[in-house]
Amino acid sequence: MPEKSTPAKRPRTVIQKIWDDHVVTPLTADEDLLFIDRVLMHERTGPQLLEGLRDAGRRPAYKGLVYGVVDHIVDTSPDRSAIDIRGRAAEFIPRLRELTAEAGIPLFDVDDPRQGIAHVISPELGIALPGCTLVCADSHTCTVGGIGALAWGIGSTEGEHAVATQTLVKRRPRLMQVRLTGRLQPGVTAKDMALALIGRYGTDGAAGCAVEFCGEAVTALGIEARMTLCNMAAEFGAFSAVVAPDETTIEWVRGRPFAPQGELFESAVAHWRTFFSDADAHWDVAVRMDVSEVTPQVTWGISPNQAVGIGARVPDPATWDDSRREFGGRALRYMGLQPGQPIAGVPIEAAFIGSCTNSRLSDLRMAAKVLQGRKVAPGVLAIVVPGSMQVRAAAEAEGLDRIFIEAGFEWRASGCSLCVYNGSDSFRGARRVISTTNRNFENRQGPGVQTHLASPATVAASAVQGCISDPRPLLG
């Protein structure tokens, strides 16, 4: 009797492979119960989650897979301490301490040298790993897709379920491939790529999709730049975003404190190398963009898709169709700009380098390269907030802190800070700001604050010139 042939496996995307690897049981044709490898909670929503869990009489299923982080409303003053909790943080941080201790969950508190923004420290420490699933009550959880993890933001109810069962019910997302080709010009960054992509396809360009970023322009990026790209997928409307892990990823993860060590690491690597998209995998949506002509990008409006190249002019919404005209006009009124006005040369009052988008060591190095031997323009408030205390320590070991301080920047402790105004930090009356953050909505960084999004290099150059400026001449 002839042998039966083994059915060929269907081609799958990297996203499908990670997803399938975590299916506990299928529930419907397009909905599964997934195992969640890591759950992170911060002080703003973590207490509510843990109180709900306790009131329901439940405990964490796997305490070693759940972590508490103090980042969202923590004061970033360099002299802060675990005892001296100021402002709104006093409502949340002590409660998170109490509840994580009660539940037996580790907490990265303000006096912990590993403290930082959740999406910075989870890959930095090796909590997030290639091929893992990770959730957190924050829309930018997809940042860790830069190391090949499938991560997304959740609400408090989902958070309770994830902590109590280490599982979540999820509908399979649509699959989107974003292939970025060509080579970036010197002085152009992953942040510029992301803003150009969102400017072209809109903030709903990836709505409901899990995105894989691929192509030679992506594989040429360092891991931290890949995380910036995946971070901005939230502004692209994506459910999640992933860059398939490669040898660059493996070497970046090697030796991280929470990552597997020794033989376990090599075993994990063999599994991580299976996470790539098969050649014939099906995509629901596929787009391609050549990045070789992308220039430093700056937003002019109140949405991340309202961005132009540094040499362009503010557009005229009056020429747009009805569906966009009104919002464009509102953006110009809020930002105090005129149609046809060059974006370069717009005066600024403050510059901010920080957030889970652009606060890693490579970001600080690029900004410091612009600032070396230069001074912040008179009247400009300039602030830099490293993404973690480990980033801060590494930057200080390289002398980057001295470059920032001598240029006129405030060198602060780690936290989300002015990514979103919460009263802990402020621009102290400054109105027009250029910022490395991810969102520029009305009042996002403070009442009446007009935010222009840009890369760390562009923010540093603008701080020096006192107006929105092209960083490339200062980078040599």
Image: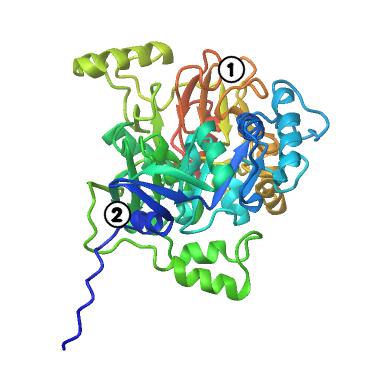
* Front residue (pair 374, 82): 82
Residue 221 appears in the rendering: yes
Q: Residues within 10 Å of mark 1 (few under 14, many from 20)?
A: some
The three-letter amino acid code for the residue at tag 2 is Gly
As displayed, is residue 33 above or below residue 337? below
Answer with the quarter of the image where residue 426 lies: top right
**Residue 433, position as x, y percentages in the image:** 52, 23
**Residue 450, position as x, y percentages in the image:** 48, 19
Name the residue rendered at 36%, 54% in the picture.
Answer: 15
As displayed, is residue 295 above or below residue 427? below
Name the residue rendered at 33%, 38% in the picture.
Answer: 196
Q: Residues within 10 Å of mark 2 (few under 14, many from 20)?
A: some
**Left or right, residue 470 beside residue 340:** right
Residue placed farthest to the right in the image? 83
**Quadrant where the image shows the N terminus:** bottom left
Which mark sits nearer the N-terminus, 1 or 2? 2
Badges 1 and 2: C-beta atoms under 8 Å apart? no
The kind of secondary structure element at disc 2 is: loop
Name the residue rendered at 20%, 17% in the picture.
Answer: 319
Answer with the quarter of the image where residue 445 lies: top right
**Residue 441, position as x, y percentages in the image:** 45, 22
Name the residue rendered at 34%, 55% in the picture.
Answer: 16
**Left or right, residue 117 beside residue 288:** right
Residue 468 appears in the rendering: no
**Residue 19, position as x, y percentages in the image:** 39, 54
The three-letter amino acid code for the residue at tag 1 is Ala
* Mark 2, residue position: 182
Answer with the quarter of the image where residue 163 lies: top right
Q: Which mark is residue 430?
A: 1
* Front residue (pair 40, 158): 158
**Left or right, residue 73 beside residue 453:** right
